[in-house]
Image: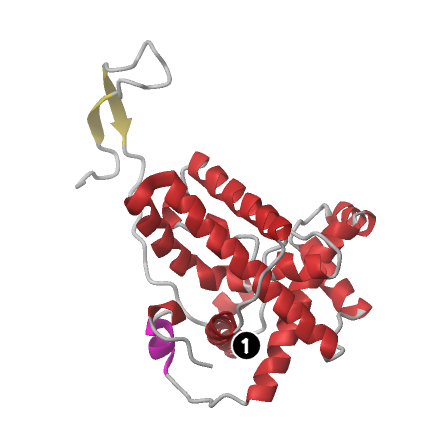
Amino acid sequence: MGARAGEERIVRVTFPADYAAADLAGKEGVFTVMVKEVRQKLPLAIDDELAKAMGLENLAELRQEIRQSLQRNYDQAARLRLKRTLLDKLAERYDFPVPTGMVDLEFENIWAQHKAAQEAGSASDGSAATEAGETATAAAAAEGEAAGEQGETAAAEATAAAGRDEGAEAAGGEEAQKAEYRKIAERRIRLGLLLAEIGHRNNITVSQEELNQALAREARRHPGHERQVIDYYRQNPAALGGLRAPILEDKVVDFIVEMAKPEVRKVTPQELLAMPEPDDGPASA
């Protein structure tokens, strides 16, 4: 701090004891630094030039792009909250035996993700068990296909899973965690079977065009490898089922919401994002 252009400074540091270069570990280092120039960050001018630098025509177009992006984010947040509340209500009202084998497979998938997250040092977010989606795997299995693609509800369940995970860990360690994740697996399978049955009874299907669009979106997520991604899915029906299942899930949810005609009210973005998760109180649709 306080250095000027053309000034020479001496910087002393002590290398960590576990420094990669063993001959320097724990030793003091002395660096002679010549300050070449000093720069200051200035506020960026919000004008047409900024818009053009971002590939747009003018500032008005940039503002419109930002406005639309924010609206999409708010729409998604509201959609996730509605969907999670609906699934909570369905889970609350419907309780029926589910195939043990399906629950076992889902639990193994959840537990493997949890352990992988622990090994990667990211288990603290508690969301590893939700990455396969809440019902996508079960819905695909109900159609006779295995799936591992995440559904839209994964993000919505992450916060609740984090709290459950921490509580289970405090209560009894790994066995308590396994019991909690098995409950999540059973819930996913039950909801998946329920949504699949609703879809079947009401002739709700996924069209080839919708599947092609999902495949194209997935391919765009891997720039430079689009052809390999498309070939992989077309050669693996089970993987393709992983793309179909979330689409079917969303269409069934849309059908239920349309039939239920929930009350819609306007809130500010701050109010929307500050709302407690549905798990924090009684679920209501």
- Picture layout, residue 189 above or below residue 222: below
| Viewer-side residue, 67 vs 165 | 165
Q: Quadrant of residue 267?
A: bottom left
Q: Quadrant of residue 144?
A: bottom right
The reply to whether residue 230 is in sight is: no
> Does residue 140 appear in this view?
yes
Outermost residue to the left: 2
Q: Which residue is denoted by mark 1 in the rendering? A: 61
Q: Which quadrant, please, contains the N terminus?
A: top left
x, y (%) of residue 253? 60, 75
Q: Is residue 107 left or right of residue 5?
A: right
Residue drawn at x 47%, y 43% is 114
Give the image location of residue 107, x and y in percent.
54, 47
Residue plotted at (32% across, 58% down): 42
Residue placed most toward the observer, 281 or 215: 281
Q: Which residues fall within the magenta stretch?
A: 268-275
Q: Left of 283 or right of it: where is 94? A: right
Residue at 77 percent across and 45 percent down: it is 228
Q: Is residue 3 highlighted in magenta?
A: no
Percent from the top left, x then y, of residue 16? 26, 21
Up/down of 197 relative to 164, above or below: below
The amino acid at mark 1 is: Glu
In-front residue for pair 57/208: 208
271 magenta-colored: yes
Q: Furthest-front residue in view?
A: 97
